[in-house]
Amino acid sequence: MGVLRYNLFWDQTPFLNLIYLAERYRSVGLGRQALASWEEKMIELGHQSVMTSTQADEMAQHFIEN
């Protein structure tokens, strides 16, 4: 269905470096659910913030903003 991958930036801050859903699973809210679940897990682990990055011309920047 998809994958969400992160690592710890400077061994401290969770950094989302990949979120991918197969095309047939897109645009139905699963990406937002995955992102929200990941954020909740990071809070449970005691992290106060998370980070990610996109290129200016990537559609992903609009997904992350909302």
Image: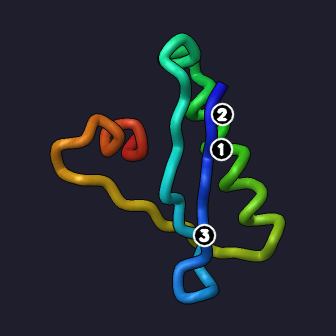
Q: Nearer the viewer, mark 1 or mark 3?
A: 3
Q: Which SS class for mark 3?
A: strand
For disc 3, the neighbor class at 10 Å (few under 14, some 14 to 19, many from 20) is few
**What's the amino acid at mark 1?**
Ala
Q: Residue furthest left?
A: 57
Kindly identify the residue that appears in the image at 40 percent across and 37 percent down: 63
Residue 5, quarter of the rendered image: bottom right
**What's the amino acid at mark 2?**
Gln
Residue 39 left/right relative to 26: right
Q: Which residue is mark 2?
A: 33
Circles 1 and 3, Cβ within 8 Å, touching? The answer is no
**Residue 38 screen position, x and y as percent:** 69, 51
Compare residues 20 and 64 and report the one nearer the observer. 20
Q: Which residue is mark 3?
A: 7
Q: Nearer the viewer, mark 3 or mark 2?
A: 3
From the viewer's perspective, is residue 15 above or below residue 36?
Answer: below
Q: Which SS class for mark 1?
A: helix
Q: Which residue is mark 1?
A: 36
Q: Earlier in the sequence, mark 3 or mark 2?
A: 3
